[in-house]
Image: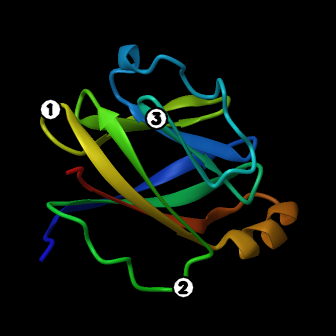
Amino acid sequence: MAELVSRREYPVEVDHGAFALEDWDDRQVPVPFPEGFDHGVFLAVRPGRLDFTSAGHTHLAALAVEVWDAEPPVPSGKWEESAMASIFCSSGRLQARSMTAGPMLEEIQLSDGPGNWSVRVVCAGREALAELAEEGAVEGVERYVAQFWPAT
C-alpha cells in the first residue's frame, strides 16, 4: 500500500490563464515556460515541465503537492478536472512559474536527486472561479492536488 512521504501547500500565481511546474534547474528545461504553451489543455507535458490551463485569467490558486512512495489512491472529493503524466526531474525539485511574473521563490521538493516521476493532478473550483473572476481579485478558489510517485 502506498505511503505518503510529504505534503505541502503552495499559493500559485496564475496569469493569462496559465502556470507551470518546471525543473528547478532550468538548464535542464530545453523550452522554458511559457514557450510552446497550449491554451485549453488542462495538463500538457514538455521536457522538464508540466503546463496547466486555469479556468481564470489572473488569480492566486491553491496547490497541494503530495509525494508518495508508490501510486496513491485518487484524492477524495469532487474534482472537475483530472489528468496523469510523467516527468523527469533532474534536480529533484520543481518551481512554479507564471506567464509573466516568472518563477515563484519557494521550491517544491520531490527527492534529493534526479528521477522519473508519475503525477496525477486533480482540480476543483474551476466553475466557481469562472463566475467570481469578473468581480476582482480571487484567492484559493481554484484548488489543485498534484500527487507524485516514482515512475516504474
Secondary-structure class at tag 2: loop
Position of 49 relative to 134 (above/below):
above
Instruction: Return the residue at label 2.
Output: 78
Q: Earlier in the sequence, mark 2 or mark 1?
A: 2
Which residue is painted at 26% across and 71% down in the image?
72
Q: Which amino acid type corresponds to the residue marked 1 in the rendered image?
A: Gly
Measured Cα–Cα span from mark 1 to mark 3: 16 Å
Residue 45 percent coordinates (x, y)? 51, 40
Q: Earlier in the sequence, mark 3 or mark 2?
A: 3
The secondary structure type at the circle numbered 1 is loop
Mark 1 or mark 3, earlier in chain: 3
Q: Amino acid at mark 3?
A: Arg
Q: Amino acid at mark 2?
A: Lys
Residue 130 on image: x %, y %: 80, 67
3D distance between C-alphas at marks 3 and 2 = 26 Å
Q: Residue at x 67, y 29 (%)?
A: 100
**Percent position (x, y) of residue 3?**
13, 71
Q: Is residue 18 above or below residue 141?
A: above
Where residue 26 appears, as percent x and y from the top left, is: 40, 19
